Image (cartoon, grey):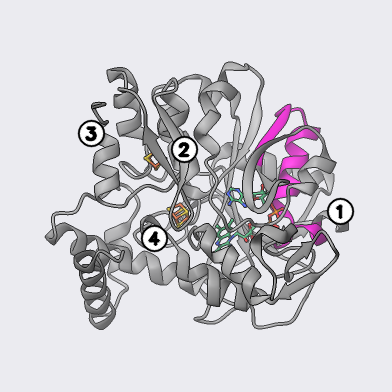
Amino acid sequence: MIPSSPTLERVAKGELCAGCGLCAGLSRGAIAMETAEPGYSRPVQKAPLAPDIEQVVATACPGSVVAPWMRAPERHPSWGPWHRTLTGYAGDSSVRHAASSGGAISALLIEAMASGLVERVLHVVADPDNPTRNIMHWSHSPQEIIEGAGSRYAASSPLAFMDEALDDGRRFAFVGKPCDVSAVRQLALSDPRVDRQIPIKLSFFCGGLPAHAGADRIIRAMGLEPEEVTAFRYRGNGWPGLTRARTADGRLGEMRYAESWGRHLSAQVQFRCKICPDAVGGVADIACADAWYGGESGYPSFDEQDGRSLIMSRTAVGEALLDGALRSGALVAEPLDIKEVDLMQPAQARRKRLVGSRLAASAILFQPRPAMKGLDVAVASRHATLQEKAKNFIGTARRIVLGRR
Ligand SMILES: Cc1cc2nc3c(=O)[nH]c(=O)nc-3n(C[C@H](O)[C@H](O)[C@H](O)COP(=O)(O)OP(=O)(O)OC[C@H]3O[C@@H](n4cnc5c(N)ncnc54)[C@H](O)[C@@H]3O)c2cc1C
Ligand code: SF4
Ligand code: SF4
């Protein structure tokens, strides 16, 4: 029998894996990422892990440790550290239209390449062979960055070939979910190549990662079968943009975002997301989100509009890139009062204030939890009512006991 990694065992026991792929990427072939039911990316160990690799995985895996927020002039228990909070959109209207919200991430990536800060971009795009799924892609031009724009509510393991990417020696920008960027920050503590070669790390507010079963349900609800779909967009091409599927023989399916996320995708979110202490990209250089006013449901209270992103610069490096993008016109933006973010992202604020109660339920049932210091979890918890704390404590405990996390 293969001796299994203590970190991976602990993470698996607590259902804490986020699917980032870091363990596989560092493992020199000992771990592979595979798809596990109902459609999450999960590590499978094939050979023993060297002790030095085990140590790095233990300190960088986001199921084991979450990177602490860095110092910044401002800090908010839900919204993280920040230098500037803005709303805006890409100066190029084709970027704005193609993107998920206002195209801020794509505009910043294009600026990072145009300014010479990076030579290329590592980000997620649709898998051409299976368009509801994701693959990692190197973009070398604005056109490729635009083709990769849009949110992809499906598993990806961006760090599964990080070691290989860092071996290459060229500088690149990285876009990942907040947990992916946490893993990159923690990896940087032991690997000097990270900060040398990834001078800019971008992220977004993340409501959680659904299993592939969620996309399959959407397609069936459209009257199509998943295997006949040859093109699929979760959203974008407008704001919020429709979820669209197309088959080889030209049949089309369409669904509004409120239905695709609200009825199908959100029900399939993995457990790690429900206790996520930093789903706002607090350790990225810049994090973006939807700058919409959606009410408690988290859905936009409008029909289609021109996109608008919430933009939070969090580090000096992020500030410099943001400045450059505003000066060159790649990005158009104006300051936003931080209190407005409470109105734009109520679902994120709610989860943050309830993470403490959900973790307490895990603790009394002797379940492993990720270490999460320096993320203001206790501060945010003070804003939860006794009733919501109790409800979430009991709900989490019940799901753990029933094995239905
Ligand atoms: C799983 C998920 C959950 C989200 N939850 C929220 C939320 O709760 N609140 C909110 O305001 N916004 C959420 N978003 C983000 C939001 O949809 C937009 O990404 C954000 O508004 C930035 O838009 P943009 O127009 O600036 O990005 P774009 O210019 O469209 O660029 C998006 C970039 O993100 C990358 N990307 C897309 N999908 C993934 C993925 N799965 N993993 C890593 N990178 C990816 C693309 O490669 C692209 O470079 C979520 C996105 C995802 C993928
Ligand atoms: S969260 Fe990432 S590093 Fe941790 S076990 Fe899962 S894939 Fe591996
Ligand atoms: S909610 Fe947190 S753990 Fe889940 S995918 Fe998003 S950043 Fe990762």
Q: Earlier in the sequence, mark 3 or mark 2?
A: 3
Q: Classify 10 Å Cα crowding around label 3: few (below 14), some (14-19), many (20 and above).
A: few
Q: Earlier in the sequence, mark 1 or mark 2?
A: 2
Q: Residue 20, can we see it? A: no
Question: According to the image, label 1 marks what residue?
Answer: 92
Above or below 165: residue 402: below
**Amino acid type shown at disc 2:** Met
Left or right of residue 250: residue 355: left
Q: CA distance from mark 3 to mark 2?
A: 17 Å
Question: According to the image, label 3 marks what residue?
Answer: 6
**Amino acid type shown at disc 3:** Pro
- Disc number placed over residue 77 in the picture, else none: 4
What is the quadrant of residue 262 in the picture?
bottom right
Residue 132 x %, y %: 65, 56
Q: Along the line of sight, which residue is nearer the eye, 215 or 62?
A: 215
What is the quadrant of residue 38 in the picture?
bottom left
Question: According to the image, label 2 marks what residue?
Answer: 33
Q: Earlier in the sequence, mark 4 or mark 2?
A: 2
**Amino acid type shown at disc 1:** Asp
Q: Earlier in the sequence, mark 4 or mark 3?
A: 3
Q: CA distance from mark 4 to mark 3?
A: 32 Å
The residue drawn where x is 72% and y is 60% is 228
Left or right of residue 119: residue 91: right
Mark 2 vs ligand 2: CB under 8 Å? Answer: yes
Q: CA distance from mark 1 to mark 4?
A: 34 Å
The residue drawn where x is 34% and y is 59% is 275
Residue 401 x %, y %: 19, 66
Q: Nearer the viewer, mark 4 or mark 3?
A: 3
Q: CA distance from mark 1 to mark 2?
A: 37 Å
Q: Which element is circle 3 on?
A: helix
| Residue 113 included in the magenta stretch of the image | yes
Q: Classify 10 Å Cα crowding around label 4: few (below 14), some (14-19), many (20 and above).
A: some
